[in-house]
Amino acid sequence: MGVTMTRLVLSNATYYVGTDFTGVTGDMVIEDERVIAVGGDQERRPGDVVLDLGGAYVIPGLMDAHCHLIYRDVADPYDIELRKSIAEATIDAVFNASTLLDCGFTTIRDVGSRGNIGVETRNAINRGDIRGPRVFPAGRILSAPGGLADFHPSHVFEGRPYPYGLGVQVIGPHEARAEIRRQLKDGVAWIKVGVSGTGFNPLCPAERNGLSEPEFEAVMN
């Protein structure tokens, strides 16, 4: 025999389904984590869990297409990469994932993270270990030396790679392809590429190209 799943019935509410601004009143039925009926008086079945929402308004889950899960109480690249440890950044990501869900966001795109925090946060949410929305994570931002994600003066690390930064610097098409392969192996959903500069990085203004044409072609191919 198949397993009968408990249905959730929301009642006494107005639902905005995204097609107009008028809304639909009545019931909403959720089964197997999917909405199967909206509006009107829906049939009640034995075992249904019924919640009276008292005239509340219900909207579809929100999506954030530009989110950094590790950003919490940060103002600049120093805060993000140096003041906070990888351990603290991980805790920030767990906190932010739960907060986003409480604010109505059911899907986010994480657009760059230190280490592999975005991927591991997604995995923990999918396992049910922590609360959070659906996460489509990038890894570290792929950049060139002097590019978007190269935030600090050269004397800080004396030209050595910084393994705990938000970005990873590549030189030439070969290194670009190799970094993409590493990130795909580690489970990213997509690749964040710093093609040009940004106002967030005073060392690489927005009008400056971050990657050479051969490097960018290697990334896209």
Image (cartoon, rainbow, N blue to C red):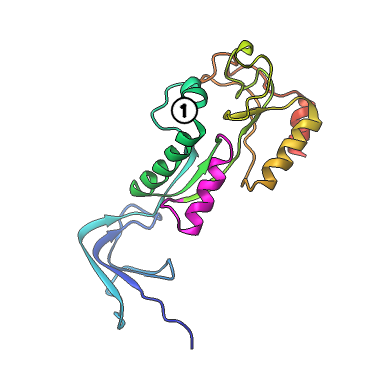
Asked whether the viewer can see residue 215, the reply is yes
Image quadrant where residue 112 sits: top right
- Going by the picture, which residue comes out furthest to the bottom? 1
Q: Which residue is mark 1?
A: 84
Magenta region: which residues?
Answer: 114-133
User: Which residue sits at x=76%, y=37%?
Assistant: 178
Image quadrant where residue 151 sits: top right
User: Which residue sits at x=47%, y=53%?
Assistant: 125
Compared to 43, does 75 lie above or below?
Answer: above
Q: Is residue 203 magenta?
A: no
Compared to 140, does 123 lie above or below?
Answer: below
User: Which residue sits at x=54%, y=41%?
Assistant: 117
Residue 147 screen position, x and y as percent: 64, 21
* SS at circle 1: loop
Residue 81 screen position, x and y as percent: 52, 25
Query: Foreground residue, 66 or 19?
Result: 66
Question: In the rendered image, which quarter contains the C terminus?
Answer: top right
Query: Foreground residue, 207 or 96?
Result: 96
Q: Is residue 120 magenta?
A: yes
Q: For the image shown, how many numbered marks are present on the structure? A: 1
Q: Amino acid at mark 1?
A: Lys
Residue 58 screen position, x and y as percent: 30, 56
Query: Foreground residue, 36 or 178?
Result: 178
Compared to 46, does 63 lie above or below?
Answer: above
Residue 6 screen position, x and y as percent: 36, 75
Q: Is residue 11 left or right of residue 162?
A: left
Classed neighbour count for the residue bearing mark 1: other residues with Cα under 10 Å, few (<14), some (14–19), many (≥20): some
Q: Is residue 50 left or right of residue 74?
A: left
Query: Foreground residue, 184 or 45?
Result: 184
Asked whether the viewer can see residue 68, the reply is no
Compared to 127, does 135 lie above or below?
Answer: above
